[in-house]
Amino acid sequence: MPVKASQMLQALTALWEEKRMGKSLPARADLPVLALRPWLGSLAIFEFRPGVGPVFRLCGTGLYGRFGGEVTGKAVSELEPAIAHSVRQELESAIGGGKPRYSQHRSGTSVFYEVYLPLAGNGEGTELVLFASYAEEKS
């Protein structure tokens, strides 16, 4: 993993761990926008909606290359099928494990280094996942 991607993803994961404060998972409210400022353009938040599945609650502009444009408010199922499948698998793995999930995704000449961080819901298990991705061009 490139140094910048590694440092950014590790720092975000460290913040996530710090905000857990002994809980199994931090809540979205534990991660205010100000605390997330260094990662903002590279972040997405996935929300799980019954009957729809994962939806982009928000998607930073730095992720447009990863997901093919603005996807805030769209369901993961609306992405290109191969991307939708891999994102859904990673989300399920992060939620099922209740811990950070690191992954890589190759698209054309880019490799995306990513982390999925599950967030606590309203007493009903995980409802949100914080996601960050950094791209590196490969030849």
Image: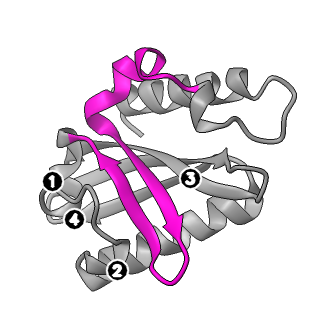
How far is the residue under mark 3 from the one under mark 4?
A: 25 Å
Q: Position of residue 120 (x, y in %)?
A: 70, 46
Say which residue appears at 71% left-offset and 20% top-offset.
18
Nearest to N terminus: mark 2 or mark 1: 1
Question: Which residue was labeled with disc 1?
Answer: 65
Q: Residue 116 or 139: which is nearer the viewer? A: 116
10 left or right, relative to 64: right
* Three-letter code for the amino acid on which mark 3 is drawn: Leu
Indicate which disc residue 128 carries. 3
How far is the residue under mark 1 from the one under mark 4?
A: 9 Å
Q: Which residues are magenta?
A: 31-60
Indicate which disc residue 107 carries. 4
How far is the residue under mark 3 from the one under mark 1?
A: 22 Å
* Three-letter code for the amino acid on which mark 2 is drawn: Ser
| Snapshot quadrant of residue 50 | bottom right
Secondary structure category for the residue under label 3: strand
Question: Which residue was labeled with disc 2?
Answer: 77
